[in-house]
Amino acid sequence: MNDVIAENLRRVQGRIAAAAIAAGRKPEDVTLVAVSKTKPVEAVAAALAAGQMVFGENRVQEAESKFPALRKQYDLSLHIIGGLQTNKARDAVRIADVIESLDRPKLADAIEAAMAKEGRTPKLLIEVNTGSEPQKAGIGRDEADDFIIACKARFGSALIGLMCVPPHDEDPRPHFTWLADRAARHGLQTVSMGMSADFEIAIACGATWVRVGSAIFGSR
Ligand SMILES: *Cc1c(COP(=O)(O)O)cnc(C)c1O
């Protein structure tokens, strides 16, 4: 398993670099977030041993069960990328370096309160539901500007960017382009978009972070 994960990481990093260069960008301007949800801690350890230090998990509880022990050994970065319930905000603030799924005022309240209690300030991304899918997390496109402005006022430099997961049955390009443009308009540097199936397209559209799971760890 370790060899397969290390080889997959090399391959994905190579594809990221090629996509960045093809887009006239620098490979080091795109960060790979390795999405380890549902995969055992051994898989994460294999990726760490291969030099991958940035990870994404959907569920706070699962992240809590896998990452605190590994932190003692590695200078890793943990991103929470899944829809977050307000009652999980405090746990997320305690364990995460980045929360990529800030998507509503009530959650902003809960995160702000948790930051005060924990004395910890993870970086924040606002997730936008660019395809207006009812079952999906993310603030609506129409509400995004106001929410971004409110979160900038509230969180200051902790708010660093935007994230999206486009509808999987559509061309992701218009979604990616919209998100990158919105981030630029608000002076936000980080654009988290693109998964195993479409990260090269996302890089062409301006992604600075790509969140890749199955291409590294195998299908779920
Ligand atoms: C699972 C997941 C990913 C990674 O998806 P893959 O298709 O396995 O690369 C990226 N982002 C989010 C929000 C996810 O839930």
Image (spheres, grey):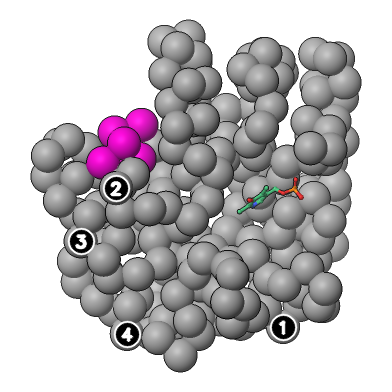
Rendered residue at 55%/39% (across/down):
57
Q: Distance between the residues labelled 2 and 1?
A: 34 Å
Rendered residue at 87%/21% (across/down):
4
Q: Please tell me the numbered disc located at residue 174.
A: 1
Residues in magenta, as a range:
90-95
93 in magenta: yes
Would residue 150 appear left or right of 202 to someone viewing this image?
Answer: left
Q: Please tell me the numbered disc located at residue 87.
A: 2
Rendered residue at 48%/21% (across/down):
65
Q: Distance between the residues labelled 2 and 4?
A: 24 Å
Disc nearer the start of the sequence (4/1): 4
Element assignment for label 1: helix
Image position of 141 with respect to 208: above or below: below
The image quarter containing residue 44 is top right
The answer to whether the residues at label 3 and label 4 have Cβ atoms under 8 Å apart is no
| Type of the residue with mark 4 | Asp
Would residue 6 appear left or right of 39 to someone viewing this image?
Answer: right
- Residue placed under numbered mark 3 in the picture: 109
Disc nearer the start of the sequence (2/4): 2
| Type of the residue with mark 1 | Pro
Element assignment for label 4: helix
Disc nearer the start of the sequence (3/1): 3
The image quarter containing residue 25 is bottom right
Q: Quadrant of the C terminus?
A: top right
| Type of the residue with mark 2 | Asn
For discs 3 and 2, the disc positioned in front in the rendered view:
2
Q: Give the residue furthest to the left.
A: 116
**Mark 1 nearby-residue class (10 Å; few <14, some 14–19, many ≥20):** few
Counting from the top left corner in percent of width and height, residue 163 is at 54, 63
